[in-house]
Amino acid sequence: MHNANIPDYTELPTNKRLLRSTIIAIISAAIILVTIVLPSEYGIDPTGIGSVTGLKRMGEIKTSLAEELKADQSNQIDSASMANPEQVSNEVEAVAVPDKVQSNDVGRTETMSVTLDPGKSTEIKITMQKESSVEFSWSSNAGAAFYDLHGDSKDIDYHVYEKGTETSKQGTLVAAFDGNHGWYWKNRSNKPITITLTVVGDYQDIKEM
């Protein structure tokens, strides 16, 4: 009576069947990892399936947001150590348009300002041809902002040049391809900020997205 529920040894799986099941499980997990997990979580797409299904773009957005949060946390620590925010604001305004940009009379010149409430974001994009370049300078009047300098086109969803958290930034942007190139900013502080951007160089159009 006590042995009624004990299965017959012939019903137990053999070592060969167990090994086959284990191999199938490992292969299935690897396929899921490569085709779903890596593209959707990290933007890594070795098979190209993530680009077709949109999972790669999802992973790129997640990665960008994670880096933004990390940069913002670092910025909050730096902001807490500022003894005189008003003085910092005045210093930022003083470098809004560096001498290099002011003295460059080649190509188009444009200055735009955008004001962001706490937690809000915006983009300014310029249309450029491949290998054309612009000199740029931007600054915030009231503390650091998260920025993402990137490009896109009808064939390229997202191409990053650089990103971080700064109160101002200047340099040269060289277009990697024909399309839109520019800046995304997000105000992670608890007060409004105004960002002023100046660009000088070879581009066709500029607009806030």
Image: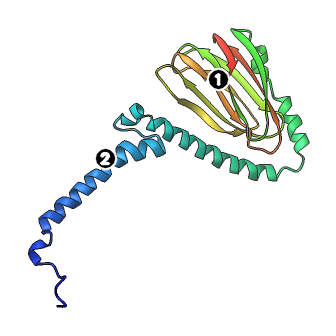
Q: Under tag 1, what secondary structure?
A: strand
Residue assigned mark 1 = 172
The alpha-carbon separation of the residues under discs 2 and 1 comes to: 42 Å
Left or right, 185 with respect to 55, comes to right
Which mark identifies residue 31? 2
Left or right, 160 with respect to 18, comes to right
Q: Under tag 2, what secondary structure?
A: helix
- Residue type of the residue flagged with mark 1: Thr
Total tally of numbered discs in the picture: 2
Q: Work out whether 198 lies above or below 40.
A: above
In the image, what residue occupies the spot 79% across and 16% down?
Answer: 102
Q: Which quadrant of the figure has residue 47?
A: top left
Q: Position of residue 6 (x, y in %)?
A: 17, 82
Q: Work out whether 154 lies above or below 15.
A: above
Depth order, front residue of 168/112: 112
- Residue type of the residue flagged with mark 2: Ile
